[in-house]
Image (cartoon, grey):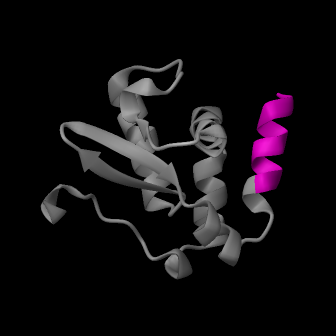
Amino acid sequence: MSDRIPPHPEVTAITLQQVLDALVDPVRRSIVTQLADATADIRCGDFDLPVSKSTATHHFHVLREAGLIRQHYAGTSRLNTLRRSEVDAVFPGLLDALVSADRVR
């Protein structure tokens, strides 16, 4: 089953530039905000996004490669979770500031 889990970078290997590049897009910021507000993991298809499924897949990939989200399968669904505690350990306050700013928008 581990072959169905996409690769995730170690949070200590990601750079601030990678994170900021990932967060420059409003769709990706929306994904992060929705995950920050969630009480459980969210299926890819359950996000409120103004883009096609294939475009959403690209955005999830960018966020995963930047170390911001973790993805795993439950049955046939790919679930997403925010790596909040890991990212907060490396970049304290960054996610809180991002989510607060995105909510104001």
Q: How many marks?
A: 0
Q: Mainly helix, strand or loop, the magenta region?
A: helix
Does residue 105 sit above or below 36 in this rendering?
above
Does residue 89 sit above or below 74 in this rendering?
below
Residue 32 point in image, percent of width and height: 61, 44
Look at the image and give the residue range highlighted in magenta.
96-105
Residue 23 point in image, percent of width and height: 64, 48
Does residue 45 sit above or below 7 in this rendering?
above
Residue 60 point in image, percent of width and height: 43, 43
Q: Residue drawn 33% across and 28% down?
A: 54
Position of the N terminus by quadrant: bottom left
Nearer to the camera, 40 or 1: 40
Position of the C terminus by quadrant: top right
Residue at the far front: name it: 39
Q: Residue drawn 52% across and 22% down?
A: 49
Q: Residue drawn 43% across and 25% down?
A: 46
* In this rendering, position of residue 9 left or right of residue 94: left
* In this rendering, position of residue 32 left or right of residue 94: left
Picture quadrant of residue 31: top right
Residue 27 point in image, percent of width and height: 58, 32
Q: Is residue 73 magenta?
A: no
* In this rendering, position of residue 86 left or right of residue 55: right
Nearer to the camera, 27 or 2: 2
Picture quadrant of residue 85: bottom right
Residue at the far bottom: name it: 12
Q: Is residue 99 magenta?
A: yes
Q: Residue drawn 69% across and 69% down?
A: 88
